[in-house]
Image (cartoon, rainbow, N blue to C red):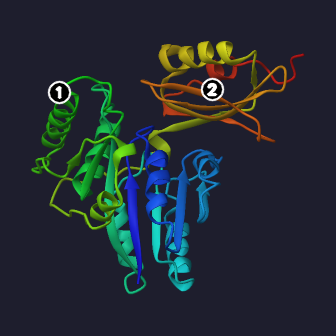
Amino acid sequence: MTRVDLITGFLGAGKTTFIHRYLEHLADRRVLVIENEFGSVGVDARLLRDEDCDIEDLSGVCMCCRGRGQFIGMLKDAAARGIDRVLVEPSGIYDVDEFFGVMDEVRGLCEIGSVVAIVDARVPETLSPESEALMFSQLMAAGAVVLSKAQGEGEGAAARTVAWLNGLILKCGGRRVLNDEVWAVDWDALTDGDFERLMACGYRRDEHPHHGANHEELYDTFMTADRCEGEADLLARLDAVMREPQFGRVLRVKGYIRDLDGHWYEVNCTPEDRAVRPVDDVRKGVLVVIGQGLSEAALKSAFLPKTRT
């Protein structure tokens, strides 16, 4: 039977990076990756394109809302094709409570392997109530919680993060207390044995309040194919978008943008990170902004019009 692993986590937690490492361990198995992007462009699927596995991209919809039927169809097709393991990377605003209903629909064809929640060790402590509810659903279902970006944050960073997560669970009405299921390790040091343990970590279905909502109404996306003047100019513009209130509450910016000289840059930003790197194999690109209460008018002026010469 096809086993399905859900690799979940809030926007920008590091799910795609973790899947890169996981796929190295699964190199001798027949694997399918299902990527769900809230924006209409499959940026994360592109980041995984060099991996030796099948990748299916479900973009432009939330997998637990309008994309639910497509997700079920993908899983049924994977089972019919004899796929050993499906790794599902939902969007960062996925309600994991919905995952179990989907798996009930494919009972007899697929079964749950593991639910792994990726959590940025520097998670902001001022999430909106909607974002707190989503993270709560991810934590309550996880067989393992893997911290990202904990290295370099100083002694006690992991313990502080776990304490904050346990406080969030209590605040949202859950009784679970995270302890040994939290992994605070350097991802480069993960061994095959570690990944075997993660593959077997399972999942939880503790009783807890459900905070279901239509996330396509609670979160906004904005896409632009505009330009920048170069890497330094791009970083300055991204910093403004992430920090200045006139743009709305920006939670993630990712994708590809070209400068006025024709050079391309890959962008992956969160409120805590500004990751930009030059790339040379992009033919067509777009930046996707995800957040709440986004101002389309302000974002339209955040970059240089592509018609500028």
Q: Position of residue 80 (x, y in %)?
A: 54, 85
Q: Position of residue 118 (x, y in %)?
A: 35, 46
Q: Secondary structure at mark 2?
A: helix
Mark 1 touches mark 2? (CB < 8 Å): no
Quick one: 238 or 224, which is closer to the camera?
238
Crowd class of label 1 (few under 14; some 14 to 19; many from 20; radius 10 Å): few
Q: How many marks?
A: 2
Q: Name the quadrant containing residue 297.
A: top right
Crowd class of label 2 (few under 14; some 14 to 19; many from 20; radius 10 Å): some
The residue tagged 2 is: 296
Q: Position of residue 243 (x, y in %)?
A: 48, 15
Quick one: 259 or 132, which is closer to the camera?
259
User: Residue pushed farthest right?
Assistant: 309
Q: Position of residue 47 (x, y in %)?
A: 61, 47
Residue 126 is left or right of residue 10, and the answer is left
Q: Residue at x 69, y 22 (%)?
A: 300
Q: Is residue 98 above or below residue 21?
A: below
Q: Name the quadrant containing residue 127.
A: top left
Query: Can residue 60 be seen here?
Result: yes
Label 1 and label 2: CA atoms lie apart by 40 Å
Q: Is residue 46 above or below residue 53?
A: above
Quadrant in which the N terminus appears: bottom left
Residue 275 is left or right of residue 6, and the answer is right
| Mark positioned earlier in the residue sequence (1 or 2) | 1
Mark sitting on residue 156? 1
Q: Residue at x 82, y 20 (%)?
A: 260
Q: Amino acid at mark 1?
A: Gly
Q: Amino acid at mark 2?
A: Glu
Q: Is residue 262 above or below residue 27?
A: above
Quick one: 228 or 299, which is closer to the camera?
228
Q: Residue at x 49, y 28 (%)?
A: 293
